[in-house]
Image (tube, rainbow, N blue to C red):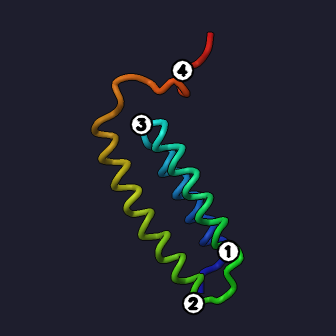
């Protein structure tokens, strides 16, 4: 049985991992997909479906962390226009 605090902890872990991307577009995509996925499953009541969704999210967290490590090896040479601060 997965508790609410475990689900919220997993969501925060995925959002934290996504913030580590050096590429703006990947950071924003990860944030959007993470929040959309958790919102989509927030009304699940069947415990087996909740456990299945939790297991899938844990697997996605592992993939996300591995992807962040890979992309950190090749950071962008220039900043995205969305990251440039106006003077």
Which badge, 3 or 2, comes first in the chain's sequence? 3
Cα distance, mark 1 to mark 4? 38 Å
The residue labelled by disc 3 is 22
Q: Residues within 10 Å of mark 4 (few under 14, many from 20)?
A: few
Cα distance, mark 1 to mark 3? 31 Å
Cα distance, mark 3 to mark 4? 14 Å
Image x and y of residue 72, in percent = 34, 40
Tell me: residue 19, above or below residue 40.
above
Disc marking residue 4 = 1
Which badge, 2 or 1, comes first in the chain's sequence? 1
The residue labelled by disc 4 is 84
Which badge, 1 or 4, comes first in the chain's sequence? 1
Looking at this view, is 6 or 80 the one in front?
80
Tell me: residue 75, above or below residue 41.
above
SS type, badge 2? helix
Q: Residues within 10 Å of mark 2 (few under 14, many from 20)?
A: few
Cα distance, mark 4 to mark 2? 46 Å
Which badge, 1 or 3, comes first in the chain's sequence? 1
């Amino acid at each position: 049985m997965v508790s609410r605090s475990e689900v919220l902890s997993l969501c925060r872990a995925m959002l934290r991992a996504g913030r580590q991307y050096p590429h703006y577009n990947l950071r924003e995509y990860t944030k959007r997909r993470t929040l959309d996925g958790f919102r989509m499953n927030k009304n699940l009541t069947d415990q087996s479906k909740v456990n299945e969704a939790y297991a899938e999210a844990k697997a996605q967290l592992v993939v996300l962390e591995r992807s962040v490590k890979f992309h950190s090896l090749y950071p962008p040479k220039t900043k995205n226009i969305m990251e440039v601060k106006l003077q």
